[in-house]
Image: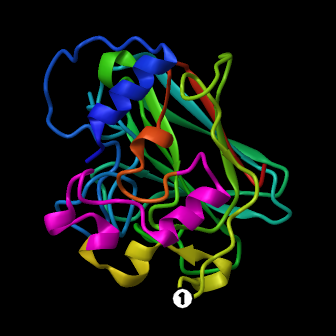
């Protein structure tokens, strides 16, 4: 799960006011691990999830949160069409999907307490439609701790497309209503190359507890960024690079609409 102490400290510095949760639900993570049980945080097949705060709801069918729900607009600024996938937290089955042509956009409507992830794959290419694939993730937890929305870009499984996220109608800075962006992907370290130009994370490629923050390494004190994760972070400072990268990767705001841009 997410290192929530770090997240709260970070948001306090940013001036984000967080009320106490109305109920304690345990894990503050927005997304659960795809391949490792008992993992720590970020979004992934390899390690875990990235977005942060205790959830008031874990699926798009649950009620609560913002009245009328939230719109997540996907903009495709790539030179090719995309298959865009949406997966609710707690669901490891087949994701919802929508084709979005080059230069086009599509609106996804979700409930106000929804949490989950979006990712894209180039049309005509395989290997990234499954949960935990080496893809760039946009992760959300709406109406989380203190009623705030938490969102992030995650490379914890790996990456395949440049990406940005922005709340609509909000002007913020840093992690308070900021707009994480990775316009240029990091160079993929040798040995982490995936299918169709994707790059795997060290956890996805090797599956060791040290890389995946599992087993005896399942705590922020014991699981530190590897040299491979640091390569990801140096190339894209806004994105999660490993499971306990919360303090430098989690953004918080409150909006009725968010825009995810592929190839910004």
Q: Position of residue 15 (x, y in %)?
A: 48, 13
User: How dense is the environment of label 1, judged by Cα within 10 Å: few (below 14), some, or many (20 and up)?
Assistant: few
Camera-side residue: 242 or 170?
A: 242
Q: Quadrant of residue 37?
A: bottom left
Q: Relative to 34, is 166 on the left or the right?
A: right
Locate residue 132, reporting x and y percent.
41, 68
x 50%, y 19%: residue = 14
In the image, the segment drawn in magenta is 210-239
Residue beneath the point at 40% across and 55% down:
43
- Which quadrant holds residue 64? top left
Q: Secondary structure at mark 1?
A: loop
User: Which residue appears at 27% of the width and 32% of the height?
Assistant: 5
Image coordinates for residue 113, horizontal then vertical, percent: 36, 28
The verdict on residue 213 being magenta is yes
Residue 178 x %, y %: 62, 28
- Say if the magenta span includes residue 116: no
Residue 7 or residue 124, whichever sits in front: 7
Kindly indicate the quadrant of the structure image that contains residue 84: bottom right
Per the image, the residue denoted by label 1 is: 191
**Residue 129 is at least partly visible in this image:** no
């Amino acid at each position: 799960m997410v290192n929530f102490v770090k997240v709260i400290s970070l948001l306090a510095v940013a001036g984000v006011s967080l009320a106490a949760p109305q109920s304690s639900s345990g894990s503050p993570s927005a997304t659960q691990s795809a391949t490792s049980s008992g993992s720590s945080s970020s979004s992934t097949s390899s390690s875990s999830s990235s977005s942060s705060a205790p959830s008031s709801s874990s699926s798009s069918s649950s009620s609560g949160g913002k009245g009328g729900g939230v719109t997540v607009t996907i903009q495709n600024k790539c030179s090719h069409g995309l298959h865009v996938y949406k997966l609710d937290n707690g669901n490891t089955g087949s994701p919802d999907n929508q084709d979005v042509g080059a230069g086009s956009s599509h609106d996804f409507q979700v409930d106000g307490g929804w949490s989950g992830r979006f990712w894209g794959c180039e049309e005509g290419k395989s290997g990234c439609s499954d949960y935990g694939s080496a893809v760039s993730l946009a992760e959300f937890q709406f109406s989380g701790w203190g009623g705030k929305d938490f969102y992030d870009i995650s490379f914890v499984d790996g990456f395949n497309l440049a990406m940005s996220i922005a709340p609509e109608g909000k002007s913020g800075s840093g992690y308070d209503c900021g707009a994480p962006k990775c316009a240029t992907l990091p160079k993929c370290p040798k040995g982490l190359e995936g299918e169709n130009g994707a790059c795997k994370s060290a956890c996805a490629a090797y599956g060791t507890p040290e890389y995946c923050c599992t087993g005896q390494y399942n705590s922020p004190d014991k699981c530190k960024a590897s040299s491979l994760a640091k390569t990801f972070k140096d190339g894209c400072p806004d994105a999660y690079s490993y499971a306990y990268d919360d303090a430098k990767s989690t953004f918080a705001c409150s909006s009725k609409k968010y825009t995810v841009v592929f190839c910004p």
